[in-house]
Amino acid sequence: MITSKKLTAERLEEIREFPISYDEDSPKLTQEQMARLKPAHDEYWNVTPVKKTISIKIDADILDALKAAGRGYQTRINRILREAVNQGKI
């Protein structure tokens, strides 16, 4: 039976720590080999995320700092949040 586990920081750490066994059918790849890998179907990797409009409150100093870098502060907020999620910080 397969149970669903949410991708919490603990679960991501559990996945990172899971031992990997290499053999002749699945050898360990070098960094150069990894760099040459490409997805079999590019259309699955080139998906534009759906944008949703929300209303949030952000500390004024943080918003000022993001706006001070010029146009695109909402894109920067999204990038910062995405990086945090991808790194398991959220």
Image (cartoon, grey):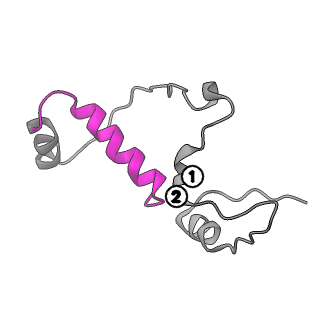
Q: Nearer the viewer, residue 45 or 88?
A: 45
Q: Nearer the viewer, residue 4 or 60?
A: 4
Answer with left or right where residue 71 lies relative to residue 41: left
The spot of residue 3 in percent (x, y) is 81, 59
Residue at 30% across / 32% down in the picture?
A: 75
Residue at 56% across / 44% down in the picture?
A: 36
Q: Nearer the viewer, residue 43 or 52?
A: 43
Q: Residue furthest right?
A: 1
The spot of residue 18 in percent (x, y) is 67, 72
Mark 2: few/some/many CA within 10 Å (<14, 14-19, 20+): few
* Magenta: main secondary structure: helix
Residue at 50% across / 25% down in the picture?
A: 48
Q: Which residues are magenta?
A: 69-90
Q: Name the quadrant of the N terminus.
A: bottom right
Question: What is the number of callouts on the image?
Answer: 2
Q: Which mark is residue 31?
A: 2
Does the stretch in magenta take in 89? yes
Residue at 16% across / 48% down in the picture?
A: 62
The spot of residue 13 in percent (x, y) is 57, 70
Secondary-structure class at tag 2: helix
Mark 1: few/some/many CA within 10 Å (<14, 14-19, 20+): few
25 lies above or below 10: above
- The residue tagged 1 is 34
| Residue type at tag 1 | Met
| Residue type at tag 2 | Gln
Q: Name the quadrant of the C terminus.
A: bottom left
